Image (spheres, rainbow, N blue to C red):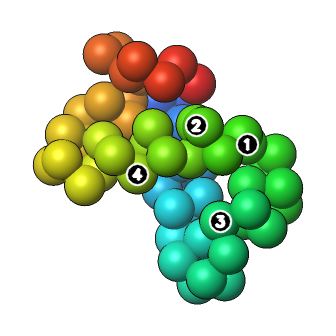
Amino acid sequence: MLKINDCIVKYKAELLNLADKLGNISKACKMMRVSRDKFYCYKEAVDNNSVESLFGKTDRCST
């Protein structure tokens, strides 16, 4: 069974993957009802190899 943190990380990862697949960040954000600011915060965390921040514990983006 997935825990809440697992679901949150999965949702954030799905957003990043959808934007990559579509090639359109705005459209992905609209589809998943997430602001572009949050998207870029999540992307920066992954790009900086700090995936732990997607768990929300030290997430300056908040969930």
Image quadrant where residue 55 sits: top left
Residue 51 pos. (x, y %): 25, 43
Determine the secondary structure under disc 4. Answer: helix
* Measured Cα–Cα span from mark 4 to mark 3: 11 Å
- Badge 2: how crowded within 10 Å, few (<14), some, or many (20+)? some
Residue 62 pos. (x, y %): 52, 19
- Badge 1: how crowded within 10 Å, few (<14), some, or many (20+)? some
Depth-wise, is mark 1 or mark 3 nearer the camera?
A: 3
Image quadrant where residue 22 sits: bottom right
Q: Are marks 2 and 1 in contact (CB under 8 Å)?
A: yes
Residue at 25% in and 55% down: 47
Residue 25, disc: 3
Under mark 2, the amino acid is: Lys
* Sooner in the amino-acid sequence: mark 4 or mark 3: 3
* Sooner in the amino-acid sequence: mark 2 or mark 4: 2
Residue at 74% in and 62% down: 26
Residue at 84% in and 56% down: 30
* Sooner in the amino-acid sequence: mark 2 or mark 3: 3
Instruction: Determine whether 7 is above or below 32 in the image.
Output: above
* Measured Cα–Cα span from mark 2 to mark 1: 7 Å
Residue carrying label 1: 34
Residue carrying label 2: 38
* Sooner in the amino-acid sequence: mark 1 or mark 3: 3
Residue at 34% in and 15% down: 57
* Measured Cα–Cα span from mark 1 to mark 3: 10 Å
* Measured Cα–Cα span from mark 4 to mark 1: 13 Å
Residue 43, disc: 4
The answer to whether any part of residue 2 appears in the image is: no
Under mark 1, the amino acid is: Val
* Measured Cα–Cα span from mark 2 to mark 3: 11 Å
